[in-house]
Image (cartoon, rainbow, N blue to C red):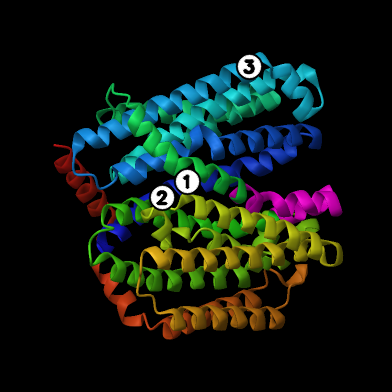
């Protein structure tokens, strides 16, 4: 099980790295090409589309994953998948038609100008295609098609970035070009997924199955509203209580901190379907516990590296005016890490307690807003980062405790908590000693010291977690990536037949 998990984690991490690379490539180009008002419009439209996808089709793809993954009856798996697909298509097509008809009025509300209705129409087309792609691509995860999932993600990233550059910088289409680029990437990826995943869908639609899945997935919409608040309450309150410039500085720190999501996304994508499929196996809880200890070693190492190298990283990717962003990176890295570790608390998902999950997440979103309201006025962006960090930690702790009530996993809590606290204190001590001035950000002696201190943090985490031998053993068992790909494809083909 763990070998399968590590293999698929590597495969899922590759497209995430490509997508993040494309995002880093486009961001400075857009920021230099568009005036602030134009870039603001693009952000609002993309932001709105992302929110729609978060609540879109009542999270039907998660319900299909819960009921179809691990189901030995192929006909029943296809019934769930087909019913979910037709519901998703109907939901997004109805939404797209409605927004298109009222595009001018929506543009007035969102952008302040009714004459920008054409931008709203392009944006909603991208939202519809991306929403359907989210459902169809998730089916590849539920069927353990990690390679196909990765290819779709890479196609989406490449065919978003390259056409966007042509549309914006050569055809001079402005914001429309950027939106057309997003739509092109999603459309190409959807076409690919439609071909490789067609065998998992039939022509059936069962109202009984739909009711069963909606009972599970509908509360997840409320949960995603909480996720939305967790992700964006800090930025909204910084803009309201401070200034747009402070949002920009904070955004640079947040962008660097999200590098840790490259670690998370591979494990998230691989773990969820595997845990679902093996949830009744008595060997699964101990395997999850071992996996968490191994993951925490990697995660704490990544937190140490990003925190200690925040100053030179900001110096490399942003202008000197953004140097203060390095102060919020350690807190935002921890926040991104803990908010993404929900897959280690699968009990509520296994027990179908999605309402409880939604309540916990919404309360966390409200807590984030309250802490930011309290901390931002006196401490600025640092207060927002601290509030968001504390919220993410509290959310994961509560979620883990609730999960243990329904699905016991024998975690070594003492070593996990002790390792986290000691490493965080170690990072804080190192940051006090290390210079954070602009002139010394890239000096060779300081960079060497940062490397030594990072290695010290990694060793400290390994000793406290007691995973030194396990890590060495796990690494020796890892096959080359090409072997991973061929084995995964062979396993998938055999199961499909």
Residue 105 percent coordinates (x, y): 75, 19
Q: Secondary structure at mark 2?
A: helix
Residue at the spot of label 1: 18
- Compute the Cα span from label 1 to label 2: 6 Å
- Whether pointer 1 and pointer 2 mark residues with C-beta atoms closer than 8 Å, the reply is yes
Instruction: Give the vertical position of 257 relative to 419 (above or below).
Output: above
Q: Which quadrant, please, contains the N terminus?
A: bottom left
Q: Residue drawn 36% across and 55% down?
A: 350
Does the image show residue 242? no
Q: Secondary structure at mark 1?
A: helix
**Is residue 277 toward the left or the right of residue 227 in the image?**
left
Residue 364 percent coordinates (x, y): 62, 58
The magenta-colored residue range is 227-251
Picture disc at residue 14: 2
234 part of magenta stretch: yes
Q: Which quadrant, please, contains the C terminus?
A: top left
Q: Residue drawn 74% across and 39% down?
A: 32
Q: Residue drawn 39% across and 74% down?
A: 293
195 part of magenta stretch: no
Q: Secondary structure at mark 3?
A: helix
Is the magenta region chiefly helix, strand or loop? helix
Quadrant of res 175: top right
- Compute the Cα span from label 3 to label 1: 32 Å
Q: Residue drawn 43% across and 63% down?
A: 403
Residue at the spot of label 3: 100
Quadrant of res 82: top left
**Is residue 229 toward the left or the right of residue 464 in the image?**
right
Q: Nearer the viewer, residue 43 or 256?
A: 43
**Among numbered discs 3 and 1, the one appearing first in the sequence:** 1
- Most distant residue in the top direction: 101
Does the image show residue 476? yes
Residue 220 percent coordinates (x, y): 51, 45
């Amino acid at each position: 099980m763990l070998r399968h998990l590590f293999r698929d984690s590597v495969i899922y991490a590759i497209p995430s790295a490509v997508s993040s690379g494309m995002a880093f490539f486009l961001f400075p180009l857009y920021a230099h090409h568009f005036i602030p008002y134009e870039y603001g419009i693009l952000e609002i439209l993309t932001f709105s589309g992302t929110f729609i996808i978060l609540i879109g089709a009542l999270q039907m793809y998660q319900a299909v994953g819960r009921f179809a993954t691990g189901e030995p009856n192929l006909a029943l798996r296809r019934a769930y998948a087909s019913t979910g697909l037709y519901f998703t298509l109907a939901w997004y097509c109805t939404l797209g038609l409605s927004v298109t008809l009222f595009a001018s009025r929506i543009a007035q509300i969102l952008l302040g100008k009714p004459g920008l209705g054409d931008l709203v129409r392009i944006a909603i087309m991208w939202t519809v295609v991306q929403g359907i792609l989210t459902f169809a691509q998730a089916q590849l995860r539920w069927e353990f098609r990690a390679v196909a999932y990765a290819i779709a993600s890479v196609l989406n990233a490449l065919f978003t970035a390259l056409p966007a550059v042509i549309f914006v910088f050569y055809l001079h289409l402005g914001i429309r070009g950027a939106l057309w680029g997003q739509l092109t990437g999603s459309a190409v990826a959807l076409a690919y997924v439609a071909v490789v995943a067609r065998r998992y869908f039939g022509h059936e639609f069962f109202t009984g199955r739909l009711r069963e899945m909606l009972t599970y997935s509908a509360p997840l919409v409320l949960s995603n509203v909480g996720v939305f608040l967790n992700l964006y309450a800090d930025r909204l309150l910084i803009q309201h209580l401070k200034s747009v410039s402070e949002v920009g500085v904070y955004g640079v720190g947040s962008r660097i901190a999200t590098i840790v999501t490259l670690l998370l996304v591979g494990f998230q994508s691989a773990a969820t379907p595997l845990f679902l499929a093996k949830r009744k196996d008595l060997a699964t809880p101990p395997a999850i516990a071992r996996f968490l200890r191994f993951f925490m070693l990697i995660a704490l190492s990544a937190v140490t590296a990003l925190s200690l190298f925040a100053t030179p990283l900001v110096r490399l990717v942003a202008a000197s005016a953004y140097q203060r962003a390095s102060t919020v990176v350690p807190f935002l890295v921890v926040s991104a890490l803990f908010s993404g570790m929900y897959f280690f608390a699968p009990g509520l998902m296994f027990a179908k307690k999605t309402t409880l999950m939604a309540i916990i997440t919404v309360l966390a979103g409200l807590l984030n807003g309250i802490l930011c309201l309290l901390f931002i006025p006196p401490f600025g962006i640092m207060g927002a980062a601290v509030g968001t960090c504390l919220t993410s930690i509290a959310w994961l702790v509560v979620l883990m405790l609730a999960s243990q009530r329904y699905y016991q996993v024998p975690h070594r809590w003492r070593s996990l908590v002790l390792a986290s606290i000691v490493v965080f204190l170690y990072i804080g001590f190192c940051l006090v000693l290390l210079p954070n001035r602009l002139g010394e950000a890239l000096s060779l002696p300081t960079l060497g010291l940062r490397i030594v201190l990072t290695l010290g943090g990694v060793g400290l985490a390994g000793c406290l977690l007691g995973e030194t031998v396990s890590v060495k053993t796990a690494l020796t068992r890892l096959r080359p990536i090409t072997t991973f790909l061929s084995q995964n494809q062979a396993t998938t083909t055999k199961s499909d037949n």
